[in-house]
Image (cartoon, rainbow, N blue to C red):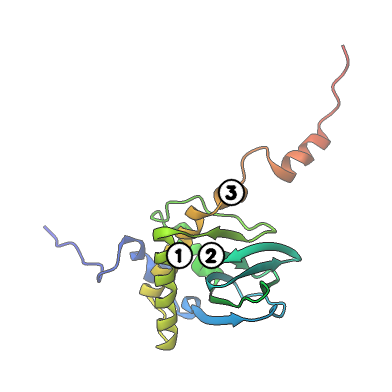
């Protein structure tokens, strides 16, 4: 009987890793610790960004819409969402920004081990307020991402950490009900267009 090949200490989601990534350019995960004592300049990310608020409270402004944030807020932004972070009066925001490519995101959602409905991308960010074990886990994972950034490391370990952060976000937010992917049949603009095309009913 052939011996089962070991997976180098990593879990099953990484079995297809080398097949999925023929080069390392898509593996670049850029993690930065930032502070904001006043409203930041208008920004947008190249690809996707997970942002975790470590300290303070204020507002996230996305495409002119405002969302309250505080310690424990975790949210995901895409490259078409222009955003600002605005601290509350007499408060300073400290947050970790973790950017990665769409290709890495596709690797997450194509994995059968990512057992969540994948959030679609709508006009609003996917946002959650973490508490308890999720808050502790997210803070630990973001700290590990910062250490990897300092050491210029980006590999399977870092990918798994971001994948876990994505899972925490989906489970803790309303993404599965607000932005289901694919959307429920007969909902949204598609059903509206169908209603317009439907011929009027004849009176009996």
SS class, disc 3: loop
Q: Are marks 1 and 2 in contact (CB under 8 Å)?
A: yes
* Residue 165: numbered disc: 1
Which class describes the residues within 10 Å of circle 3: few (<14), some (14-19), or many (20+)?
Answer: some
Report whether 58 appears left or right of 24: right
Q: Are marks 1 and 3 in contact (CB under 8 Å)?
A: no
Q: Are marks 3 and 2 in contact (CB under 8 Å)?
A: no
SS class, disc 1: helix
Q: Which residue is mark 2?
A: 74
Which class describes the residues within 10 Å of circle 2: few (<14), some (14-19), or many (20+)?
Answer: many
Residue 60: image quadrant is: bottom right
Q: Residue furthest right?
A: 203
**For residue 117, above or below residue 10:** above
Q: Position of residue 189 (x, y in %)?
A: 74, 45
Whichever of callouts 1 and 2 sits on the residue coming sooner in the sequence is 2
**Which of 18/48 is in front?**
48
Report whether 185 appears left or right of 98: right
**Which of 47/93 is in front?**
93
* Residue 180: numbered disc: 3
Q: At x 44% / y 67%, what residue is drawn?
A: 138
Quadrant of the frame with the N terminus = bottom left
SS class, disc 2: strand
Whichever of callouts 3 and 2 sits on the residue coming sooner in the sequence is 2
Q: Position of residue 176 (x, y in %)?
A: 55, 49
């Amino acid at each position: 009987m052939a011996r089962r090949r070991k997976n180098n200490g990593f879990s099953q989601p990484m079995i297809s890793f080398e097949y999925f990534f023929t080069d390392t350019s898509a593996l670049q995960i850029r993690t930065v610790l930032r502070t904001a004592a006043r409203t930041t300049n208008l920004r947008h990310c190249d690809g996707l960004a997970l942002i975790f608020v470590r300290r303070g409270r204020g507002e996230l402004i996305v495409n002119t819409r405002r969302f309250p944030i505080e310690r424990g807020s975790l949210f995901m932004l895409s490259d078409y969402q222009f955003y600002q972070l605005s601290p509350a009066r007499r408060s300073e925001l400290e947050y970790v920004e973790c950017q990665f490519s769409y290709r890495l995101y596709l690797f997450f959602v194509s994995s059968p081990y990512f057992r969540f409905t994948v959030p679609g991308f709508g006009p609003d960010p996917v946002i959650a307020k973490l508490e308890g074990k999720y808050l502790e886990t997210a803070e630990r994972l973001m700290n590990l991402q910062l250490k990897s950034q300092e050491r210029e490391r980006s590999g399977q370990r870092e990918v798994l950490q971001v994948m876990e952060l994505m899972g925490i976000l989906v489970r803790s937010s309303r993404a599965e009900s607000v932005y289901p992917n694919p959307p429920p049949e007969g909902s949204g603009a598609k059903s509206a267009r169908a209603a317009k095309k439907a011929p009027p009913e004849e009176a009996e």
